[in-house]
Amino acid sequence: MWLPLLVIGGLLLLYRWYRQSHILENLSDKYVFITGCDTGFGNLLAKQLDKRGMKVLAACLTEKGAENLKKEASSRLQTVMLDVTDSQGVRATTAWIEQHVRGEGLWGLVNNAGISIPIAPNGWLNKEDFVKVLNVNLLGMIDVTLSLLPLIIRARGRIINVSSVMGRLAFVGGGYSVSRFGVEAFSDSIRRELRCFGVSVSVIEPSSYKTPATDMETTLQSLHSLWSQAPLWAKETYGQQYFEVYCRFIQYKLSKCNPHITQVTDCMEHALTAVHPWARYSAGWITKLFYLPVSYLPTFMSDYLLAHPLSNVTE
């Protein structure tokens, strides 16, 4: 009984691999716009696609980031300064992109720009702490996507939105997980909406990778600053022990960040270049073998697995 099932399962996996191995032709004719290219995933992807011969339009937040990227790429790659929270800047960048792509339209949009700090227990934070993250990771992404939508539809192109396993499992406080859950919801709705126009939408769901966004020193400095400014009731309720255990918990998580960020950019590249892109990419084995399965467990089990290091602090 089991042998036929194993054979069928193996054949399905083989077919799935074969189907996903088909890559588009004429990649050198296609324009791709990537946000957040100063460092990290966006920077590496821009150089990766440039080497493939694609026409990369890279948005950077700083002049230094743009200059460094240009030094490591070919003359095909063009950069533009963009803060995704600035709607006027988004409109200006859209006009700049249209000048480049003209009648061809925009083949690929990679919404990569994002921030993670502040990450802390919610009780230590205020509304502005959430707004800071949501403006970049969610509202800025939506603004860029809607502004570029006519160009993407014209090319029957691709939208790739960077989310996270924390868009499935919220195990730290702050706006980061909230924003990533929002990315998932927006991506699902617009994927179904644009299907009839030949536009595909993919979500990239990495776990923690070693980038400037996961820098341990910066994150711990932010935690100490938030704790020092936390309301008196929060300090009395959570207590110093909770703060110290939470810092060790975050420190442990960041120490385990995966340094192989090409695992993420390879997913992005596949979403842009494959004949049949996936709707979701779970980057990294820990995502596939731990976080993804945990997201399907009953709530009491996932709560135990994700909150266990802090569960006994105040008891």
Image (cartoon, rainbow, N blue to C red):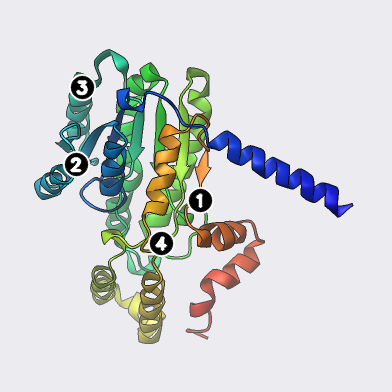
| Camera-nearest residue between 314 and 37 | 37
Kind of residue at badge 1: Ser
Mark pair 3, 1: CA separation: 32 Å
Kind of residue at badge 2: Ala
Q: Position of residue 267 (x, y in %)?
A: 44, 45
Mark 3, Cα crowd under 10 Å, few <14 / some 14-19 / many 20+, is: some
Vertical arrangement, residue 287 with respect to residue 64, above or below = below
Mark 2, Cα crowd under 10 Å, few <14 / some 14-19 / many 20+, is: some
Q: Residue at x 22, y 32 (%)?
A: 90
Q: Secondary structure at mark 2?
A: loop
Vertical arrangement, residue 117 with respect to residue 315, above or below = above
The mark found on residue 100 in the picture is 3
Whether tag 4 and tag 3 are in contact, CB under 8 A, the answer is: no
Mark pair 4, 3: CA separation: 35 Å
Whether tag 3 and tag 1 are in contact, CB under 8 A, the answer is: no
Q: Which residue is mark 1?
A: 282
The mark found on residue 73 in the picture is 2
Q: Secondary structure at mark 3?
A: helix
- Which of the marked residues, 2 or 1, is nearer the chain's N terminus? 2
Q: Residue at x 23, y 52 (%)?
A: 39
